[in-house]
Amino acid sequence: MEHLRYPIGPWTEKPAYTPDVVAAIIDRIEQTPAEYATLTANLDANDLAKQYREGSFTIQQLVHHVADTHMMHLFRFKNALLMPGQPALMADVSGWASLEEARTAPVSYSLTMLEGTHQRIVFLARTLSPEQLAITYHHTIRQRDMTLAQALDTVAWHAEHHLAHIRIALG
């Protein structure tokens, strides 16, 4: 069951966030919205209702969840740049995915949101100096301080993680 929960493995911190590593992470963040759009382009209501494991989010909920979560990340990055070391903005994004809206809204809404949010994250990330990438915020759920470089890495991981879930659900 663990391979279904974490098909690409849980997020793990990289040994170092060199400029080349960060550039590769940013490139990955830039590419993933197109992959979501391609994977979901021809899905009907029955396909969107598929789950990657019993009791999991549906494909439709996953797309909305990723868009919501990544918007939260953008807000966290901006807050950290203005108020380093502060607790990160938190919301129950998994709970949001359980709302009727996330179960019924067209995925195209969140695909548009994901594209725009990733464009903003990528643009912002490419403006950051090494010193800014080292700025931290406190992640209260993970109970740790995270640098902006690590946070970018979690965005890339999260996008890949749920792409893998969608691929599993589609079989």
Image (cartoon, rainbow, N blue to C red):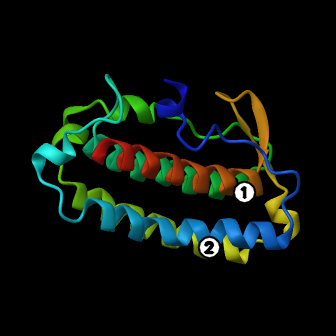
- Residue 122 percent location from the top left of the image: 59, 71
Furthest residue in direction front, as rendered: 171
- Residue 82 percent location from the top left of the image: 72, 57
Q: Is label 2 in a helix, a strand or a loop? A: helix
Quarter of the figure with the C terminus: top left
Q: Which label was assigned to residue 59?
A: none
- Residue 66 percent location from the top left of the image: 43, 49
Q: Is label 1 in a helix, a strand or a loop? A: helix
Residue at left 38%, top 28%?
95
Quarter residue 36 falls in: bottom left
Nearer the observer, 102 or 54:
54
Residue at left 40%, top 53%?
67
Label 1 packing within 10 angstroms: few (<14), some (14-19), many (20+): few
Pointer 1 residue: 82
**Amino acid residing under circle 1:** Leu
Examine the rendered structure and indicate whether residue 54 appears above or below residue 164: above
**Amino acid residing under circle 2:** Asp
Q: Is residue 110 left or right of residue 75?
A: left
Q: Earlier in the sequence, mark 1 or mark 2?
A: 2
Examine the rendered structure and indicate whether residue 79 appears above or below residue 9: below
Examine the rendered structure and indicate whether residue 97 appears above or below residue 121: above
Q: How far apart, in angstroms, are the residues tagged by discs 1 and 2?
A: 25 Å
Nearer the observer, 130 or 63:
63
Residue at left 25%, top 59%?
109
Q: Number of labelled discs?
A: 2
Furthest residue in direction left, as rendered: 45
Nearer the observer, 145 or 30:
30
Pointer 2 residue: 27
Q: Is residue 161 left or right of residue 153?
A: left
Q: Is residue 65 left or right of residue 76?
A: left
Contact (Cβ within 8 Å) of mark 1 with mark 2: no
Residue at left 25%, top 40%?
102
